[in-house]
Image (cartoon, rainbow, N blue to C red):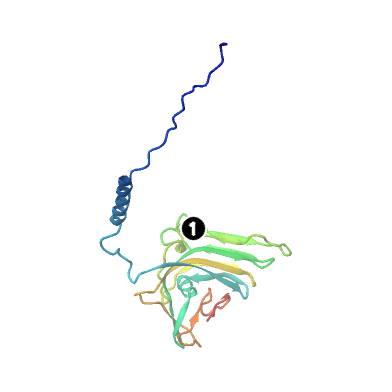
Amino acid sequence: MPKGVLVPSSAPKQESKAAPPSLAVGRQMRRSKRSKSRSHVPSLPPDLAKGGRQILSQRIRFTATSTVSQVTIADYMLLAACGTIATTTTSVATIASTVRLRRITIWPDAGGEATIYWSPAPGTGDGQPDIAHDESIPTGITMDKPVTSMPPRNSLASFWRTPLSSSPVEIFKITATAGSIIDVELDFTICRGIIPTVLTVTGATVNSFYTFYLDGISSHKLQPLATPSI
């Protein structure tokens, strides 16, 4: 036989087969999974915040019915912008107890100006630069991006607020031209087991829902859209 030529073997080849898994092992694994899942169930109900507090997020849209220049936005105005229920014809109660601002976005009118001024927290103003975002648009120029700003660190708006209408605290200021659209994004908690903030109004219908103007009761220049306002 010439060298280099391989002759196939006549013996049949043995195919290796994997052994089937043991049923006993499968039962043991299922039992261990069940026992593990039971161990994660707490023996007692977990603690909840007072009244079952929930944090909700909302985006509220306003429009400037006329030009505003550095109009003050107080903390209780944000609370009332989340919504109120009229308890009498002259008073409304907020549905939220605490509020925290996340972002402000302004789409200015063509040729207009938009500015957001953030108020520093007490004790942090010294040595801090002025916090402001400004955008001025030449007449006839179309703007493809809005003015948007998040509360800077050490600003009042970056903290949770429990406002009191009797002692309003300035959170930020806005400058915007008539026709501007303003979006306010915030988090708030529902008044469950907590006394709501009561505000004095005129001409309310009892048990009706109202959203406040962003600039408050008396100014009425930053009007909420898509919801009844007062």
- The correct choice, above or below, for 150 with respect to 10 in the image is below
Residue sitting at x 56%, y 67%: 183
Q: The N terminus lies in which quarter of the figure?
A: top right
Please tell me whether mark 1 sits on a helix, a strand or a loop. loop
Q: Which residue is mark 1?
A: 152
Residue at the extreme top: 2
Check disc 1 and give the amino acid type. Answer: Pro
Residue sitting at x 64%, y 60%: 145
Residue 196 drawn at (x, y percent): 39, 77
Residue at the extreme right: 140
- The correct choice, above or below, for 227 with respect to 132 in the image is below
Label 1: few (<14), some (14–19) or many (≥20) C-alpha neighbours in 10 Å: some
Q: Nearer the viewer, residue 34 or 38?
A: 34
Residue 155 drawn at (x, y percent): 46, 60
Whether residue 56 is visible here, answered yes or no, is yes
Whether residue 118 is visible here, answered yes or no, is no
In the picture, measured across the screen, residue 96 lies left or right of residue 114, that is left
| Total tally of numbered discs in the picture | 1
Residue at the extreme left: 43
